[in-house]
Image (cartoon, helix red, strand yellow):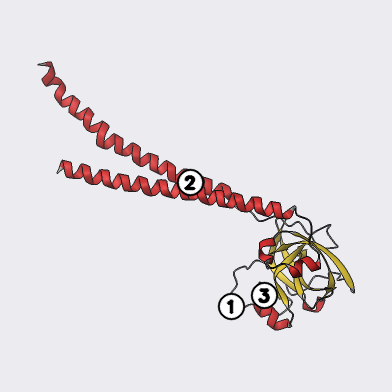
Amino acid sequence: MSRVRFVVVSVATALTMAATASLGLWQLDRAAQKTALEASIRARADLPAWGNGELLAAPDRSAALYRPVRLQGRWLPQHNVFLENRQMDGRTGFFLVTPLRLSGSEQTVLVQRGWVPRDFNDRLRVPAVDTPAGEVRVQGRLAPPPGRLYQFGEAGTGPIRQNIELAAYRLETGLPLLELSVQQTGDDEGPLRRHWPLPATDVQKHHGYAFQWFALCTLVAGLYLWFQIIQPRRKSNRRNGPEDAR
């Protein structure tokens, strides 16, 4: 029975160590992937800015996310959307999203123009933001469509919304929207704040998880050595000691 128990414990220990070590290596691999992604994002952010022509001609725009752009077009303020419960610099307010019709084309792109505070005394009050008429130049960077927050029920259709769903918004407005957005950069403009951080990749989180898995693997190995090898030998030596003395 003692021999069988030793074999069972040894097999279980080996499997546990293999699993925890594999999970630690997987977390390190995830960290390496995210480090490479972060480097790619920062490299794209340093590329020359695209204009209208380069943006419209790009075969795979999703591969150019976070690349700078300098676009020309006309604002369509009748389709303004204020996304609520959005944070910037630790404050909660709205992200103002306005479609921009690109000059020389019918194509339109959603522009996240910046963050504005909301009136907490009148939650239905839309902030007053100046929207220039005529052709404008917009400096920014390509980005995914505005991130989704949890909401109860379906997205609304008014000027204040929790989320904006690109497909539904395209049907609602009839606009030929590109499958991405632009985060407008540059100086703050009136109430608009434009302190957009690059996306965080949480590499440190994966390093922390890897340390925990490797620590657990080491703990299992230490417990096995102590209870299955060291402690039984010490007991055996104590039992055999008096006999050897006689």
- Which of 83/35 is in front? 35
Residue 170 higher or lower than 192, as above or below? below
For residue 86, above or below residue 230: below
> In the picture, which quadrant includes the N terminus?
top left
The label number, if any, that marks residue 210 in the structure image: 2
Quadrant location of residue 174? Answer: bottom right
What is the spatial separation of the Cα atoms under label 2 and label 1, in whole angstroms?
Answer: 38 Å
The location of residue 43, given as percent across then percent down, is 70, 52
Compared to 10, does 60 lie above or below? below
* Disc 1/disc 3 C-alpha distance (Å): 17 Å
Give the residue type that dot 3 points to.
Leu
Q: In this view, does 68 lie to the left or right of 167?
A: right
Sequence-first tag of 2 and 3: 3
Which of the image's four quarters has the C terminus? top left
Say whether marks 2 and 3 touch (CB < 8 Å): no
Q: Position of residue 127 (x, y in %)?
A: 80, 70
Which residue reaches farthest left? Answer: 246
Mark 2 and mark 1 residues within 8 Å of each other at the beta carbon: no
Q: Residue 137 appears at what percent x and percent y?
A: 86, 66
Q: Residue at x 60, y 72 (%)?
A: 151
User: Residue 14: image x %, image y %?
Assistant: 31, 45
The mark that comes first in sequence, 2 or 1, is 1
To which residue does mark 3 refer?
Answer: 166
Q: Nearer the viewer, mark 1 or mark 3?
A: 3
Q: Which quadrant of the structure image shows residue 63? A: bottom right
Question: Which of pointers 2 and 1 indicates the residue nearer the eye?
Answer: 2
Report whether 215 appears left or right of 243.
right
Residues packed near mark 1 inside 10 Å, few (<14), some (14 to 19) or many (20 plus): few
Residue 153 marker: 1
Tell me whether circle 1 and circle 3 mark residues in contact (CB < 8 Å): no
> Which kind of residue does numbered mark 2 sit on?
Ala
Other-residue count near label 3 (Cα within 10 Å), few / some / many at <14 / 14–19 / ≥20 = some
